[in-house]
Image (tube, rainbow, N blue to C red):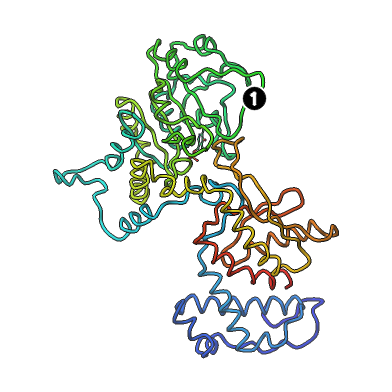
Amino acid sequence: MAAGSAAPGASARPWPQLPAVDKLLNSAALAPALERYGRQACTQAVRDALDALRDQLRAGLPLAPGATDMQAVAEAAQARLATRFAPRLQAVFNLTGTVLHTNLGRALLPQEAVDAVVQALLSPANLEYDLATGGRGDRDDLVESLICELTGAEAATVVNNNAAAVLLTLGTLAEGREVIVSRGELVEIGGAFRIPDIMARAGARLVEVGTTNRTHARDYAEAVSGDTGLLMKVHCSNYEVTGFTKSVSDREVADIAHGRDLPMVVDLGSGTLVDMRQWGLPYEVTVRETIASGADLVTFSGDKLLGGPQAGLIVGRKDLIARIKKNPLKRAMRVGKLTLAALEPVLRLYLHPEQLAQRLTTLRLFTRPAADMLAQAETLAPALQATLGPTYVVETAAMASQIGSGALPVESLPSHGLRIHPASGRQAGRQLLQLEAALRALPRPVIGRIQTDALWLDLRCLEADQQPLFAEQLPLLASQLHS
Ligand SMILES: *Cc1c(COP(=O)(O)O)cnc(C)c1O
């Protein structure tokens, strides 16, 4: 349809004259945008703004007064540019109570790691260059000895994430062969990672043994055949089997495997490097203990309990790691220099356990005393109440944070925060969703969680240095809620 012809049923009002693209681009109103975003993007934005007006006219929709003025069209174009050029990856406040939140990027890294990443971005580095000989190096060398020291393993390699670590391990050691796993350990992590699917992709045949709740040593032993490639244990990261249960220890499965000259592999998931009980946290088996129990290879994530960048670590027997490194898929799954730059200083923090709880961001968040969050809640509650007005009730409340990312799913960490609920029961559901949306629309979006007819903001992950930024933007909520 030609611009200017009215659609059937559209009002018979004559179309207003729209400003010309050239005129707009040369107007004083768009000069700053032209400087900032360039001519091409500005032309596009102006055309899109004009097209939107034409669409509205064609549809017979009423325009705001003055919507077709130079100034108004320039502003509309600028708004389009601001949206187009705004970063899509944005910092948010994670007040969900889940510290390692996969959807919010898991572990936050300490400053040492940030500095190393910045340096790796700005300057060439000896990523695969042996400074002693001037010859070619191996990128794993940058962290391998550190990982071995911290886990007791003979060798180590690093890939993109733990899913890749498992895939590469199975694909290297068990392609075309059988892998024995307990039915109680066929986990699904976050929808896309399922042990049976990964197994199929790796070209290995899954042999399930035992039942969902009980697996015995003899189940493993009886399943071993000439086709067996390895025996595998998978950490039940995100669930717990309780009640009438029996599982076989790493040690026993390793003994059965070794009796038949087969390797035993453990997918540990989180894979902590230290016993977290020393900070009053729940027990989680360490990588070192798993190696000591006889596992030939252990895989785990870099950005879960370890507190580093997204990565998958494979540690264990030197001959097996060597085979994995020779697999061409290793090249496809290898990590970049930014990951290694971040991982190295994080691992080094573990050499100084006395300061770990202060310096490793994730551990500092796990161990924040509940009294800190209570004090914050008491400061923030009146400010938030003042902003929200009488429609909502803001209270301080005790809550339970989760470690997250499948680590220790049934354990929780005592915390405090803000519990907000609509003052009246009428339309309470809609008001809660409105509040949640308004918090998400703040310059630094605030992500909470709705539970039992209230919005919960767990303050565990709002460290003191972040609190002013959080408090400063609260007044903006009032206008968003009432617009
Ligand atoms: C988290 C997890 C994975 C996947 O790790 P990513 O680093 O997210 O790829 C695999 N296995 C287990 C047992 C896990 O807990």
Q: Would residue 114 appear left or right of 184 to someone viewing this image?
A: left
Q: Would residue 370 appear left or right of 259 to someone viewing this image?
A: right
At 51% from the left and 13% from the top, the residue drawn is: 220
Quadrant position of the N terminus in the picture: bottom right
Which of these two is toward me, 395 or 24?
Answer: 395
At 75% from the left and 69% from the top, the residue drawn is: 389
State whether label 1 is within 8 Å of ligand 1: no
Q: Would residue 215 appear left or right of 110 to someone viewing this image?
A: right
In the rendered view, tell whether residue 41 sits above or below residue 131: below
Amino acid type at circle 1 is Thr
Which of these two is toward me, 61 or 58?
Answer: 61
Residue 132: x and y, percent?
A: 15, 44
Residue 322: x and y, percent?
A: 30, 29
Residue 14: x and y, percent?
A: 75, 88
In the rendered view, tell whether residue 441 sits above or below residue 253: below
Tell me the quarter of the picture where residue 469 sits.
Answer: bottom right
The residue where tag 1 is placed is 242
At 73% from the left and 62% from the top, the residue drawn is: 434
In the rendered view, tell whether residue 457 sits above or below residue 247: below
Residue extending farthest right: 426
In the rendered view, tell whether residue 75 sits above or below residue 416: below
